[in-house]
Image: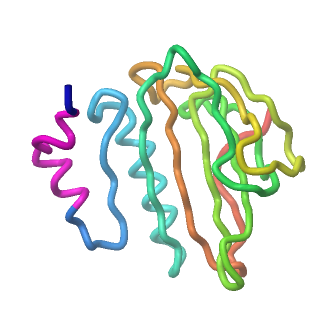
Amino acid sequence: MQSKLIDCPNERQREFFLSRTRFTAYGGARGGGKSWAVRHKAMLMGLAYPGIRMLIIDIAACYSDPEVIAAHGGTVLLSGYDSGGGNYVVLRGEFSDRYDVITRYFHLAKRSVVKGRYLQTGERIGIQGNTGTQTTGQHLHFEVWIVPKNVGYSVSLREK
């Protein structure tokens, strides 16, 4: 059976895939709801800094293999808990000579890394979960930010 996404995208999916805009927010664990606030806040933060490019996606629960792994090598900037995003990990690595990549992983059931640790691509970050108030079901909220090297990372997340 083929995926509905491949066969016939809905209007929002079509808009996302055809978009040439600099910032696009789409999806949610159940198509929107509370996670809209998280995406909206992240987008506004990205807009405050010229040159930042972002991709934000929610990946549906995978009960047979809930392990979350690092999308790239880099240093763990933050590993903590936020009331809205639940358990989270933020990783920063080199993208090019002018840009870095920051990946953010939210709603983890368990975090396996601490701030300052260097990770290789594919190393375990945690277990997918449903923590925080800004979630409507088990999933991984995953963000990719491409930022100029001269831009520091500052966000209103608490470390724990």
Outermost residue on the front side: it is 1
Pick the residue in front: 149 or 50: 149
**Residue 76 versus residue 49 in the image, above or below:** above
Quarter holding residue 99: bottom right
**Residue 99 versus residue 124 in the image, above or below:** below
User: Residue 77 vs residue 33: left or right?
Assistant: right
User: Residue 31 vs residue 91: left or right?
Assistant: left
Residue occupying the point 20% across, 32% down: 2
Pick the residue in front: 149 or 6: 6
Q: Quadrant of the N terminus?
A: top left
Across and down, in percent, residue 112 comes to 79, 29
Q: How is the image coloured?
A: rainbow
Residue occupying the point 45% across, 43% down: 38
Q: Is residue 152 magenta?
A: no
Q: Please give the range of residues in magenta.
A: 3-17
Secondary structure of the magenta portion, mostly?
A: helix
User: Residue 26 vs residue 69: left or right?
Assistant: left
Pick the residue in front: 99 or 80: 99
Residue occupying the point 44% across, 61% down: 44
Outermost residue on the bottom side: it is 98
Q: Quadrant of the C terminus?
A: top right
Across and down, in percent, residue 31 comes to 27, 33
**Residue 50 versus residue 153 in the image, above or below:** below
Across and down, in percent, residue 74 comes to 78, 57
Residue occupying the point 65% across, 54% down: 155
Across and down, in percent, residue 98 comes to 67, 84
Q: How many marks?
A: 0
Quarter holding residue 80: top right
User: Residue 85 vs residue 41: left or right?
Assistant: right
**Residue 3 versus residue 154 in the image, above or below:** above
